Amino acid sequence: MHVLLHRKLVFERIDIDDAVFPRNSVLAFHGKPGASEPDAGDDVPLEHLEFRNLTWISYSGIAVAYDGEIDFDAHWRPRHAKLRRPGTSPPFTLTWTREVDADRWQMRIHVGGGTAHGNVALKPATGGAMHLSGHLAPRDIEVACALRTFNRQSPVGGKSSGRMVLAADGRKQETT
């Protein structure tokens, strides 16, 4: 269902079944020059996205199917998200939960028979860039099993535990 709000199309819910999403197609989603920003204002252009058997094809051509759902707040900020790999054993799930209205999320990951829980935060940086940072604490993850979950093979085996620090910077790509 959609609602016309301030001359903008707003979707309450989108359901996707059996779709393929090659990594290289992401460029097609960039806006045209002069187009309004999708996250301008406090409106929520999409409230809920649910997908089943959505296949992501990586840059190296490896296809991985996911099921999941995302509830969005304003500015495309996920309020709650859950991602699953159907048919994997042990199961893979990633749950992403926003801390109130802050740009900070708790992450709970179950993969390879273990866990990797932690948090991430998104902060504005200089020149309109954004900075993502966080940490995860992997515990008792069977390495080969975790990689098989994503259709990859491992040259090593055994369980892994430790601490993982995440950091990424990015800015909007200018279109010409």
Image (cartoon, rainbow, N blue to C red):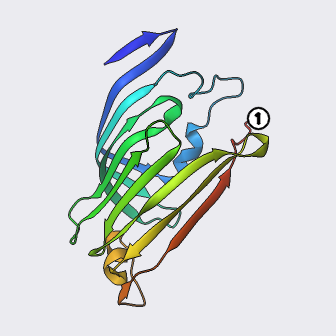
- What residue is drawn where x is 47% and y is 57%? 119
Quadrant of the rendering where the N terminus is positioned: top left
The residue drawn where x is 41% and y is 28% is 46
User: Which corner quadrant of the image does residue 160 belong to?
Assistant: bottom left
Depth order, front residue of 69/24: 69
Q: Residue at x 62, y 27 (%)?
A: 37
Q: In the image, 38: left or right of 82? A: right
- In the image, taking residue 122 as reference, residue 91 lies left or right, namely left
Give the class, few, some or many, for how many residues have Cα within 10 Å of label 1's Cα (few <14, many ≥20): few
| Residue 38 on image: x %, y % | 56, 27
Q: Is residue 172 left or right of residue 103?
A: right
Compared with 105, 90 (above or below) is below
Q: Residue at x 71, y 45 (%)?
A: 129
**Residue 77: x, y in percent?**
49, 38
Mark 1: secondary structure = loop
Instruction: Look at the picture and state if 8 lies above or below 147.
Output: above
Location of the C terminus by quadrant is: top right
Q: Quadrant of residue 84?
A: bottom left
Q: Position of residue 105 (x, y in %)?
A: 45, 49
Q: Amino acid at mark 1?
A: Thr
> Pointer 1: what residue?
176
